[in-house]
Amino acid sequence: MHKIILGTRGSELAKTQSLAVARLLEAQGLDVELKIIQTKGDISTRSLVELGGIGVFAAALRTALLHKECDIAVHSFKDLPTAAISGLAIGAVPAGAAPSDVLCARDSLSLAELPKNSLIGTGSPRRAAQIRAIRPDLQIVNIRGNIDTRLARIKASGVADKVSGIEAEGKGNARLRGDLDGVILAKAGLERLQRCAAITEELDIFPAPAQGRLAVECRSEDAPWNSESALAQALAKINDNAVRAAAFAERAVLAGLNAGCAAPVGVKIVDSQLADSQLVAGVFSLDGKERCCAAEKFSSREYATFSPCEIPQIDAQAAALGQRVAAQLLAQGAGEIANLQAVKARGSGSD
């Protein structure tokens, strides 16, 4: 049996996601060993802004890959910078989880039911902008930390007593428990950690590009279109062409906008039984008062028959689609609605 080393962060969510990919690869005949790669983001108590934001958690894993300390790494695709890294490739994008954002609130309240001036926690300018558009009377609180840490901040939630492994956010963390009326998180992370009981409402807002999808990164020579090795063949088997195309198209919107990690940009695939499915993207002002949207036809069916050696063609076609949507947004004045180059932590990679 061919043995490979899978590099992962040490957080509960990262290990859970990595184990899920390991099981898929083991079903293809590989022997997979997980190796914890410590990142600067894991050990520092400074804010993510100081650490460099969205790319900090991927940097150590990518370095380990390039130095051959591991053979593959698993990322939350939404947390990867859009720029390609020489010598590395996204070898597989498995079938994804739900891409939506959800509200976890006290007393099982929905967004509409929250009292005026309720405190809602999120580390995402994209989420904050869209919530302000729906409920401008709510107060948005910037938060960070892993999923259990965030859930524990909900008033009278009892989450702290029900879950284990809550990580401290630094000195004084205890006083932050139970200080919020609700938090907004990605549904995918809650599903993977079996925390869905905390969800009080699935929100109708634009998610982050590639939210809910996992990216399995490898060295370029091990990519399915470059090799017939056991690893390359296994990666080809777990790759979902349609999910991959959607993720690359969504991320190309960000790249086309030259958007920074704090730009309030959301993208989603809108399926319809009566009309063509579409890739739809929105740019939002931080105060929630302005927005612009653009869309292009997206058909996942057209990617179903692509062979592993044609995966780069999938990526290129999907990226071109996303770039067209980005061009429409720029033509509508997206740069005036929001600071597209804003650089601030969009999230900790854990929600």
Image (tube, rainbow, N blue to C red):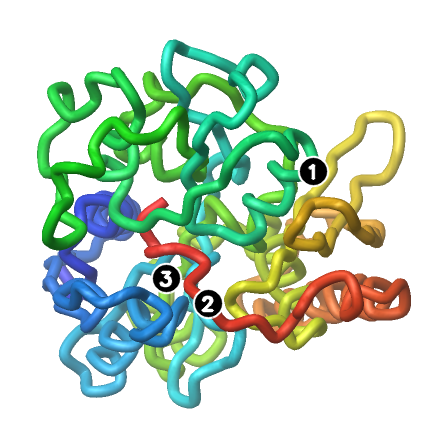
Count all numbered tags in the image, as a single digit. 3
For badge 1, the amino acid type reads Ala
The residue lying toward the viewer, choosing from 173 and 61, is 173
Q: In this view, does 6 lie above or below 182?
A: below
Q: Which residue is tagged 3? A: 216
Task: First in sequence, mark 3 or 1: give its number.
Answer: 1
For image coordinates 49% across by 30% down, the residue present is: 102
Q: In this view, does 164 lie above or below 345?
A: above
Q: In which quarter of the image is the N terminus?
A: bottom left
Question: Is the Cβ of the residue at disc 2 closer than 8 Å to that at disc 3?
Answer: no
> Where is residue 51 shown, x and y percent of the image?
30, 74
Task: First in sequence, mark 1 or 2: give its number.
Answer: 1
The residue lying toward the viewer, choosing from 161 and 12, is 161
For image coordinates 27% across by 26% down, the residue present is: 194
Q: Which residue is tagged 2? A: 344
Rendered image: mark on residue 133: 1
Label 1, label 2: how many angstroms apart (C-alpha)?
A: 21 Å
Q: How crowded is mark 1: few (under 14 residues within 10 Å), some or many (20 or more)?
A: some
| Figure quadrant of residue 310 | bottom right
| Figure quadrant of residue 33 | bottom left
Of circles 3 and 1, the one toward us is 1
Label 2, label 3: how many angstroms apart (C-alpha)?
A: 25 Å
